[in-house]
Amino acid sequence: MKTVARILTGIGCAVALAAAAGATAQEKQVYRYTDKDGNVVYTDRAPPSDSKDVQAKRLGPNYIETNELPLASRQAMERYPVTLFTFDCGELCQNAEGLLNRRGVPFSTVNVEEAKNAERLKALTGDTQAPVLQVGDKLYVKGFNEARWQAMLDDAGYPKSPATRRGQPLRPPVAPATPAPKDAPAAALTPPPGGGYPKQ
């Protein structure tokens, strides 16, 4: 019996120490910005001076941020980030971008009409024809071919469809109460069915 009490006391102390350590954790500064090549970067280091759209966030202890991306998408994005080399080429480029959007694949866009981006594409593929889908560092497909693009995204581990979102049912507006005449007797208040709480 004494041994069980000692174990429980030890566990309680460990939990208390962990909670105290978490409470005293320092806040951490993180950044989101677009680099000079048009890539979106997330980091805890200060962005370079030529960065665009810099956003800073301070994360405190036990900070939880919801992420609508499913775990499989986040893992695939870390291992095989997707880049779309494109330009204003009309329906072909719109279909290419639409495929990624319909599938819910996070991707960065590189406009090859800019000279530095055209050179980047040429270094990757050997020419400057677009659209080009790059998955990871070395895998790419020249031109829009839906079957090949889908297969490459499958191999990288991206889900075949975006995560479904749960919508909240719309409630009809509540009409304002009309005041009772002064000489009317006081009516008993009755709660609405279910106590007025939203259904779970």
Image (spheres, rainbow, N blue to C red):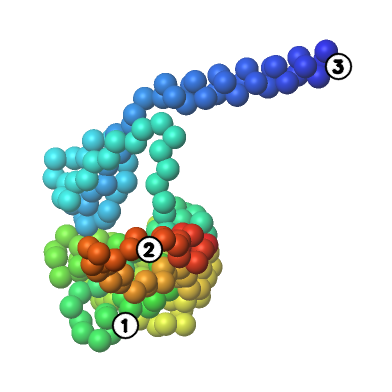
Provide the residue designation for mark 3: 1
For mark 2, give the secondary structure: loop
Q: Position of residue 58 (x, y in %)?
A: 29, 36
Mark 2–mark 1 CB contact (< 8 Å): no
Q: Position of residue 193 (x, y in %)?
A: 50, 66
Provide the residue designation for mark 1: 95
Comparing labels 1 and 3, the label whose residue is closer to the camera: 3
Which residue occupies 31% across, 75% down? 97
Task: Determine the CA span between mark 1 and mark 3.
Answer: 70 Å
Residue 136 appears in the picture as rendered: no
What residue type is disc 2 on?
Answer: Ala
Label of residue 107 in the image: none
What residue type is disc 3 on?
Answer: Met
In the image as oriented, which residue stretches furthest toward the right?
1
Label 3 CA crowd tier, 10 Å (few <14, some 14–19, many 20+): few
For mark 1, give the secondary structure: helix
